[in-house]
Amino acid sequence: MPVLDPNLAGSDRSLSAAYVEAVLPDLLVHYGLSRETVLARAGLGEASFSRPDQLLPLVDVLRLFLVILQACGDPGLGFEIGKRVKPRSYQVLGYVILASADLGQAIDRLIRFETLSGKLGETTLSRQGDRVRLSWQCPLEGEPGRFLAEAAITGWVAFMRPLMPPGLAPERVCFRHSPPPEVARYDTFFAAPVQFDADFDGVELAASLLASPLESADPGLAVMMEREARELLTDFDVNTNLVSAVRAEIYRQLADGEPSLETVAEALGLTARALSSRLTRQQQRFAEILDGLRQSLAELYLQDPALSLTEIALLLGFAESSSFSRAFRRWRGVSPNHWRRGE
């Protein structure tokens, strides 16, 4: 099972709760898994999905999907996630794309507003003669990156296919990683040549397809959704940058002891009162951000057998290992040693 880099916990990578909630129920049914059990093993509560506009740290999303991977053993998990993408998976981003006049406008809006669904990878469009290449740059390498790339690119096709005239398909679907054991399901779903070990992650289309009208086109709705998307993007940048900056600064300070609201605020050029007030407006609390980050990091550190409990406690900013053990029991209901042994 892939092991996540602890540095990911202190990064600003995120994914919307709406996306996860849109694909998760059907995915669990597909693999015959219990939602309650999967969330418990991932250390996530239902509160994580209570606000569709909430952004989940990518480290938490990956922990969730890696629990599913461990249970199902399917190397095509990312592909299966992408197949289940729907317009509501992306909320406003999805609806502004739906209202677009043609495929070219839809792709333009995907690129301009994609951060509304979270800060993850980056989509670009380039011309290759009479073709266009829609590429996705994944922020991670290795196994987690493979799942993310397959989910993103398969999701594009799953989203757009019902909106296009029948029979249209990419000329080529490409993944940089090596082929999985079962490639037939990829060929069947994409209805196009699928190339693994390619030099990019994405799809190639005939340039003429950009003018293909969308069956869901709605000029009036498009104007309204474009305006809403622009306004949300401004708010998104402000809000996301603040929470991500707080997480990153907490992560930076942890090795020197438990960070406080005052020390983090000072590092961000704010007063403690101003930072607390801004977090409250976003329904966030400093103590909850600190606690959530510590839990994520604890589970990543415990996967490293070279780290003792005392060393992990210090990395998490606890003064002693007993404080860490008490916190871990609160998070997981078992001691760190029991969790590490899988008991």
Image (cartoon, grey):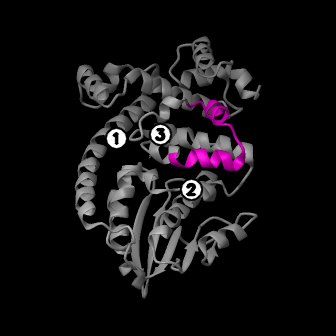
The answer to whether the residue labelled 1 contacts the one labelled 2, judged by CB atoms less than 8 Å apart, is no
Q: Is residue 253 visible?
A: yes
Extreme-bottom residue of the structure? 130
Left or right: residue 313 compared with residue 259: right
Residue at the spot 40% in from the left edge and 67% down from the top edge: 124
Tell me the distance, in whole angstroms, between the alpha carbons under discs 1 and 2. Answer: 26 Å
Q: Residues within 10 Å of mark 1 (few under 14, many from 20)?
A: many
Give residue 209's position: percent from left, percent from top.
Answer: 42, 81
Is residue 40 inside the magenta stretch?
yes
Residue 185, quarter of the rendered image: bottom right
Tell me the distance, in whole angstroms, between the alpha carbons under discs 2 and 3. Answer: 21 Å
Give residue 317's position: percent from left, percent from top.
Answer: 50, 21
Question: What is the magenta range?
Answer: 22-44
Q: Quadrant of the C terminus?
A: top right
Q: Which mark is residue 317?
A: none
Label 2 is placed on what type of residue? Arg
Q: Which residue is mark 1?
A: 240
Q: Which residue is mark 2?
A: 84
Residue at the spot 59% in from the left edge and 54% down from the top edge: 81
Label 3 is placed on what type of residue? Pro
Is residue 213 inside the magenta stretch?
no
Q: Which residue is mark 3?
A: 57
Q: Secondary structure at mark 2?
A: loop
Q: Is residue 1 visible?
A: no
Label 1 is placed on what type of residue? Thr
Q: Secondary structure at mark 3?
A: strand
Q: Residues within 10 Å of mark 2 (few under 14, many from 20)?
A: some
Instruction: Please name which of the two marks, 1 or 2, marks the residue nearer to the observer.
Output: 2
Q: Earlier in the sequence, mark 2 or mark 3?
A: 3
